Amino acid sequence: MAIFNFTESAQILRETILGLFDNANRCRCLACGIDNFLGNQHCSGALCGQALSVSLAAQKRALAENIHNHVLDHLRQHGPPAHGRLRRLVRVVILIESARLEGPATLATLIIPDNMIALFGQNSLLSD
């Protein structure tokens, strides 16, 4: 069984989730590519003024809140997850991050959890 570094893994998950919250509060204009704050109905670009799609940002925010509630609260209140649970938590982070992407292949090209763990550089996160 691998040795866990839960303090470091919780920090990585926390930073990922905070990034998701930041992105969930922004809506990218599809016409000019400028990031606008959630609540703007039209792009704030000087020459753009394109109507913004708020539903995608609202959906991303709901997903970010879900991962925040289920992952961070669990790590804070219950300590280290049981064997195999951390990998499932990473899977959820990957799903949220993938939902943030804008393109046709968001869910079809999900990163494999083991690869995501390797990207984090945290071999100690492996639970089995």
Image (spheres, rainbow, N blue to C red):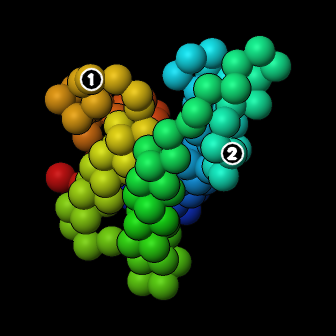
* Residue 64 image point, x, y percent: 47, 57
Furthest residue toward bottom: 77
State left or right for residue 108 relative to residue 70: left
Mark pair 1, 2: CA separation = 25 Å
Q: Nearer the viewer, residue 110 or 123?
A: 110
Asked if residue 54 can be seen in this view, the reply is yes
* Residue 66 image point, x, y percent: 41, 66
> What label sits on residue 104 in the rendered view?
1
Element under label 2?
Answer: loop
> Circle 2 is placed at which residue position?
40
Within the image, what quadrant is residue 41 found in?
A: top right
Q: Nearer the viewer, residue 1 or 119?
A: 119
Within the image, what quadrant is residue 36 found in?
A: top right
Amino acid type at image mark 2: Asn
* Residue 5 image point, x, y percent: 47, 57
Q: Residue at x 61, y 19 (%)?
A: 33
State left or right for residue 82 relative to residue 16: left
State left or right for residue 119 relative to residue 24: left
* Residue 50 image point, x, y percent: 62, 26
Element under label 1?
Answer: loop
Q: Earlier in the sequence, mark 1 or mark 2?
A: 2
Q: Residue at x 22, y 35 (%)?
A: 107
Number of marks in picture? 2
- Which label lies toward us, 1 or 2? 2
Amino acid type at image mark 1: Pro
